[in-house]
Image (tube, rainbow, N blue to C red):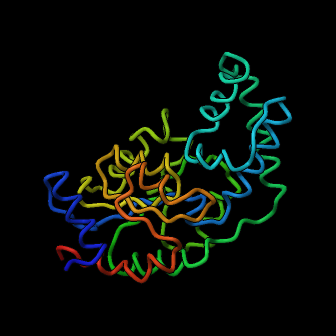
Amino acid sequence: MEDTVTAAIRRYEQRRNCRFRFDALLSDMDGVLYDSMKYHAAAWAATMQGEGIECTSDEFYMHEGRTGKATINIYYRRDKGRDANDEETARIYAEKARRFVAFGKADPMPGAQKLMLHIKEAGVKTVLVTGSGQRSLLDKIEADYPGIFTPETMVTAFDVKKGKPDAEPYLMGLKKGGVASNNAAVLENAPLGVEAGVAAGIFTIAVNTGPLPDAALVEAGADLVFPDMASLYRQIDKIITYNR
């Protein structure tokens, strides 16, 4: 009987009519590399509440991965019946960023550094694909994950027009990694990010580091769902060595 990981890869191969090989990892940042999503969610909620918009922190986990402009417009359309103008967007995002920074340092997600180093040492390329434009975190990447990513292997909110759940960020990640969709895996923690990875035709792994149920990630199309980085680390060699 096949183990869960191998079975998931074989289902992906059958669905895509392809041969999978793990040559590149396309990793999200917030909630994957850093335990920062709780701060993003709280900052978004406080900022939007300051605009007179009713919302809770937890609901922003469902919007994780969107660009700031897209997130703001969802609430403006819902409560004001229109998109935010450029001045409003800039002001609101600046306030959200200020609140986020005020929370202080976001620590690396437990187990993420060990996992990323192991993947890199196995000869797998690593590409960062994040919807974040939060420079305070982007500037920390090299310090916390030395040698794992380079500016040339990063896709951020500054690079894309559509953002997650559109496939654009991960298609750009494939291009920067120099690999085909069936030779990469996505690592995500949010439904919209999972949807983006699936839309790009990539084998998509979810690690549930937030308050959402596993079902939200499965329904978004995740090929595998793990409860934490340590659980993924224990299984990652099955993915690394598949078809090698």
Residue 152 appears anywhere in the view: no
The x, y position of residue 228, in whole percent, is 53, 73
Q: How far from the left and from the top, in percent, is residue 160?
A: 49, 38
Instruction: Determine the image quadrant of residue 187.
Output: bottom left
- Which residue lies at the image location 42% right of the left edge and 50% below the top edge? 219
Q: Is residue 61 left or right of residue 194?
A: right
Q: Is the residue 109 above or below the residue 184 in the image?
A: below
* Of 221 and 159, the residue lying toward us: 221
In the rendered structure, the answer to whether residue 176 lies left or right of residue 134 reads: left
Q: Residue at x 42, y 48 (%)?
A: 220
Q: Position of residue 231 (x, y in %)?
A: 47, 78
Task: Say if residue 166 shows up in the picture.
Answer: yes
Seen at 63% across and 32% down, the residue is 69
Of 2 and 146, the residue lying toward us: 2
For the C terminus, the quadrant is bottom left
Spot the residue most to the top: 81
